[in-house]
Structures are given as C-alpha cells and as structure tokens.
C-alpha cells in the first residue's frame, strides 16, 4: 500500500471510532479502538512503538514512544485535548524525523467535528 492509501484507510478508521465513541474519552480508549479498526481493515500496526533518540551519534538511555505506527510507514499521534497546541505538530515532525518516516497523522478526538481535527503532516 502507498502512504496515500494508508492515510485514506486511517482517516476512515478515525471517523468510525469517533462516530461510535464520540468526544471526551481518554486518549488510551481511542488508541485501543483505532488499533482495532485498523487491524479490521487488514493493516499492520505497532502500538506505543519505541523511538530511539540519537544525540551526536550516541543513543540516549531515554526512548520516546509514538502512539501508532501503521504498515511501518505512517505515524499516528493521538490527542484528546480541549485545545490543540502547535507543539503537538512539532512533536509528530520530530517522531517522523527520528524514525525516518515521511507521513504522519495528528488527530484530536476531543472535538465537535472530527473531520476538521485530523491533520496530515509530511516530513
């Protein structure tokens, strides 16, 4: 699958989760439901994937964790917050750079309109 095909499936899965659960739940609930939806669509996923941090050629002892990696190509960063902050996009860009990936999806489930709360970010 191409990254465009994967992001199309991800958007559909996000919409289905939101339609079923609505806004206002914990991020962990949305993560579990979204992983279920993605697997039902035949996509391979990795949850809470470790992101190694390399600093000046040395791997730091502290790793980061991204929410979901789909088909080893697209990173999904989930939020369930009242207000989206610019730092969330920057965080996803950092994950993309550290993991050498091109495409990410940032989504906030705590919204009245999920369609306007999904952002595609390219590295």
Image (cartoon, grey):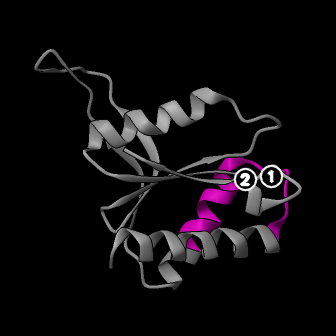
Farthest residue toward the left?
A: 57
Q: Are marks 2 and 1 in contact (CB under 8 Å)?
A: no
Query: Is residue 89 placed above or below 44 in the rendered structure?
Result: above
Q: Is residue 22 magenta?
A: yes
Q: Position of residue 95 (x, y in %)?
A: 38, 38
Quadrant location, the N terminus: bottom left
Residue positioned 48% across, 78% down in the render: 39
Judge by depth and name the residue closer to the eye, 27 or 96.
Answer: 96
Residue positioned 68% across, 29% down in the render: 85
Q: Is residue 62 magenta?
A: no
Q: Which residues are magenta?
A: 21-36
- Determine which quarter of the picture holds residue 73: bottom left
Q: What secondary structure characterizes most of the magenta part?
A: helix
Residue positioned 42% across, 71% down in the render: 4
Judge by depth and name the residue closer to the eye, 23 or 7.
Answer: 7
Q: Position of residue 17 (x, y in %)?
A: 71, 70
**Which circle marks residue 25 in the picture?**
1
Residue matched to label 2: 117
> Dot 1 lies on which element?
loop
Residue positioned 89% across, 56% down in the render: 112
Cα separation between marks 2 and 1: 15 Å
> Dot 2 lies on which element?
loop
Q: Position of residue 58 (x, y in %)?
A: 13, 19
Left or right of residue 118, residue 103 in this image = left
Left or right of residue 78, residue 67 in this image = left
Query: Is residue 19 placed above or below 48 in the rendered structure?
Result: below
Quadrant location, the C terminus: top left
Left or right of residue 68, residue 100 in this image = left
Farthest residue toward the top?
A: 56
């Amino acid at each position: 699958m191409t990254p465009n095909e994967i992001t199309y499936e991800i958007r559909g899965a996000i919409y289905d989760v939101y339609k079923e659960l609505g806004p206002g739940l914990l991020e962990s609930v949305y993560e579990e439901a979204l992983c279920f939806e993605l697997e039902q669509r035949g996509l391979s996923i990795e949850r809470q994937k470790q992101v190694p941090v390399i600093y000046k050629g040395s791997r730091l002892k502290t790793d980061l964790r991204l929410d979901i990696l789909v088909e080893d190509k697209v990173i999904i960063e989930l939020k369930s917050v009242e207000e989206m902050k610019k730092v969330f996009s920057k965080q996803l860009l950092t994950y993309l750079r550290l993991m050498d990936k091109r495409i990410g999806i940032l989504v906030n489930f705590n919204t009245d309109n999920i369609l306007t709360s999904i952002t595609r970010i390219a590295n």
